[in-house]
Amino acid sequence: MPLRPIETRPAGRFVLVFLGDSLTEGYGLARDDALPAQVQRRFDARGMSIEVRNAGVSGETAAQGVRRFDTATKNADGVVIQFGGNDMMQGRSPAAIEANLKDLVAQARARRLWVGLVGMKAPPIAGPAYRAAFDRIFHDLAETHAAPLYPFYFDGLIDARTGAMRQDVFIDRVHPNAKGVAVVAEGITAWLERSLPVSALQRNV
């Protein structure tokens, strides 16, 4: 696991932007049930001075995320990057997807933002060659750029090996309902607590 950077910053809330597609935006859900809002509630319950912002746009690919990175992360201290599902469904090459994600990480680093990655895994229907290449993207990026990785957005909802889904936690075959997002939020909040800079995890007093 990459070491947390030790640094100081002015007092105030650490602004963490979730930049992604419909899985971030909260397709079919009330705004308060979307992933960023559910993570925010968990941080608030822990007394942490972190402000979580939702910069998800349904239907977006990583390439589209690149184009709006600066606007979406204005005044941010950190960014969680969550893309890949739409790229995969559009049949984009793993190399092109990786290049876009690498660009997003580079933009974050150029702005001196903390950056974390939320990974995706291709389903069995994608075929073994595409699946192997796609699934390597996120691990390779995390290792190359020393970026914290949450390996699989759907952890606890989909069996990554077989593609079997928990039917009770989905709106359709792609988007989790509020109950499903709660499972994701628990995992991602715990990951962020392990991964964010020490200065971001200060408690409200």
Image (cartoon, rainbow, N blue to C red):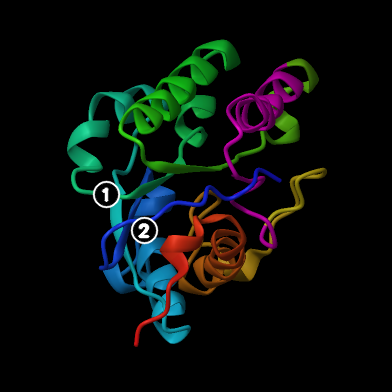
Q: Which numbered tag is attached to residue 76?
A: 1
Residue 139 magenta? yes
Q: Is residue 172 above or below residue 100?
A: below
Q: Is residue 91 visible?
A: no
Q: Nearer the viewer, mark 1 or mark 2?
A: 1
Say what amino acid the circle numbered 1 marks: Ala
- Mark 1 nearby-residue class (10 Å; few <14, some 14–19, many ≥20): many
On screen, residue 11 versus residue 26, left or right, reads left
Residue 118 magenta? no
Q: Position of residue 160 (x, y in %)?
A: 75, 46
- Mark 2 nearby-residue class (10 Å; few <14, some 14–19, many ≥20): many
Q: Mark 1 to mark 2: distance in Å?
A: 21 Å
Looking at the image, which residue is at 43% across and 72% down?
A: 202
Which residue range is magenta in the image?
130-157
Q: Position of residue 38 (x, y in %)?
A: 42, 72
Say what amino acid the circle numbered 2 marks: Gly
Q: Position of residue 37 (x, y in %)?
A: 35, 69
> Which residue bears the numbered disc 2?
26
On screen, residue 205 versus residue 168, left or right, reads left
- Quarter of the image with the C terminus is bottom left
Q: Is residue 104 above or below residue 53?
A: above
Return the residue nearer the eye: 84 or 41: 41
The image quadrant of residue 70 is top left
Q: Is residue 134 visible?
A: yes
Q: Circle 1 sits in a helix, a strand or a loop, which is it? A: loop
